[in-house]
Amino acid sequence: MTLDAAGTGSQGPSLAVLLDRLPERVLCYRQRDRVIHYVNAAEAAEYGRRPQELIGYRLDDALGPTEASRLASHAGDLTQQEPVRSTITREGDRWIEWVDQLLVGPEPAVLAVGRDVTEREDAVRELAASEHRLRLVLDAAPVGMALVDLDGTLRQVNRALCRFLGRSEDELVGMSSLDLTHPDDVEADLAYRRSLRDGEPADDTLAKRYLRPDGSVVWGMLKVSLLTDEAGEPVQMVGQVVDMTEQMQREAELQRAAATERAAADRLRELDETKNTFLSAVSHELRTPLTSVLGFAKLVRDRHHELPPDRLASSLEALARNADRLAELLADLLDVDRIMRGRSLPLRSGWVDVAEVVADALTNVDLQDRAVTRDLTPVEILADRAKLERVVINLIANAVRHTPEGSAIEVTVASTDGGARLTVADRGPGVPDELKAAIFEAFDLGPNEAPHVGGTGIGLALVRGFVELHGGGVWVEDRPGGGAAFQVELPRHPPAGGGR
């Protein structure tokens, strides 16, 4: 196959002349043996020859064995369907892109066109090298980094971010940043991104929580920068995340420690106030019978020979009564102390009638002229009579303190499926809901202005301790019509070894 090499004619320049004027390199060689049929001036110049000198020249002779074999295989695979981009070769400091087309005829030939693509290839390779360097920088960065679309889709992530989030690069690319954000921080994240796009960020950074696949939570300080196009319009975002998990944990621990310290300080103040109130109350409670004991003791000691028998007997009775009161107060203190320390108290159990115990207790407590209405149903239970009587006495004494003059105290004993229920109700100011549990704590007298306080602060604590020792329960309710109703439930049989 040959090309017309004539210069010009009536139809204009010949094909050969036109091809010689092209900056691209053109040659035509036989498919079978790669013998050259035609070269243009640009191709011949590469060999330092004139085009006519290369006609009949075999391309394989100018190539090494490997390249010759590759060219033979490539030429043999060509079809007439469409041009084929064969390769880009490096020739000196230039890159040449070859496009081949099979020419079908009696002797098939290959038309090859080579174009200098050095500028393009250098740019492509420089871009690839730049991306490689960027990748190295990203992976070497100690903080997490990501290239993110405006809708929050991750397009590129570095190793630090993968480690931080506990996911591989393949997992992260294509995910939405919101899928990685703790649900409670999603709104803050969206607001931060909106402020960036609007050009009015409230803060340069955002502290937020991220979720790992195992469900654990990590803290990160996020800083986002916008990437813009030539017109200044945002196209993507670059996010940087600094791991703040340990710092936030330390801050949380410090806050917890500070809160614990404040609570401890508050508790110490409460205990100090409770101590002062308790000491004042106990001093008052002890001072009254102690003063009587001292007074009657001195009277008997100094004037017993002058006193008529009935006055002497009444003085000795008052002396014994106040001494018994002192003994009861000290016994209460010791028993409450044992209960608070978790030390066991023995139960000397026997069958007792709760109604009978209540009736006896009513004769042994100073009612201070308060009226008592009673509805006592006989109920026998297995209990420590002495401790049960102290429960009743403390509840009635508490009711006396809070029942106004002219009002009655109501005492009821009723049978239940499991044992007995004792109710002691007064017509006082009642017990606020926030104090209904606290008043059974030892030495907890409540605030000074609160209703239903007084005494030493141990009576109701002793009631609870003795009731629980029997396996029962005690609580306070609002009495219909005003006042407080203290309820005690006792089982028919106390648990083995007591209720504690």
Image (cartoon, helix red, strand yellow):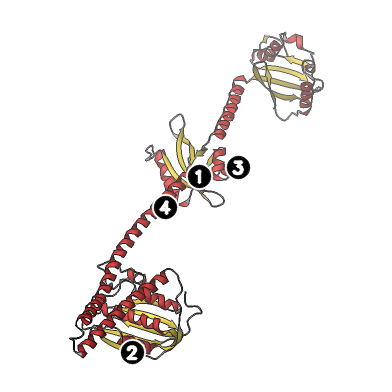
Residue denoted by label 4: 256
Left or right, 136 with respect to 382, comes to: right
Q: Amino acid at mark 2?
A: Asp
**Marks 1/2: CA–CA distance:** 73 Å
Q: Mark 4 or mark 3, which is nearer the start of the sequence?
A: 3
Q: Amino acid at mark 1?
A: Ser
Residue denoted by label 1: 177
Q: Mark 2 or mark 4, which is nearer the start of the sequence?
A: 4
Residue 199 placement: quadrant: top left
**Marks 4/2: CA–CA distance:** 53 Å
Q: Of the residues tagged 1 and 4, which is closer to the observer?
A: 4
Q: Amino acid at mark 3?
A: Asp
**Marks 3/4: CA–CA distance:** 39 Å
Image spot of residue 342 (x, y percent): 45, 70
Residue 330 placement: quadrant: bottom left
218 up-or-down from 8: above or below: below
Tell me the element at label 1. helix
Q: Which mark is residue 170?
A: 3
Q: Mark 2 or mark 3, which is nearer the start of the sequence?
A: 3
Q: Give the residue at x 48% y 84%.
A: 493
**Marks 1/4: CA–CA distance:** 31 Å
Tell me the element at label 3. helix
Characterize the local packing of mark 1: few (<14), some (14-19) or many (20 or more) Cα atoms within 10 angstroms.
some
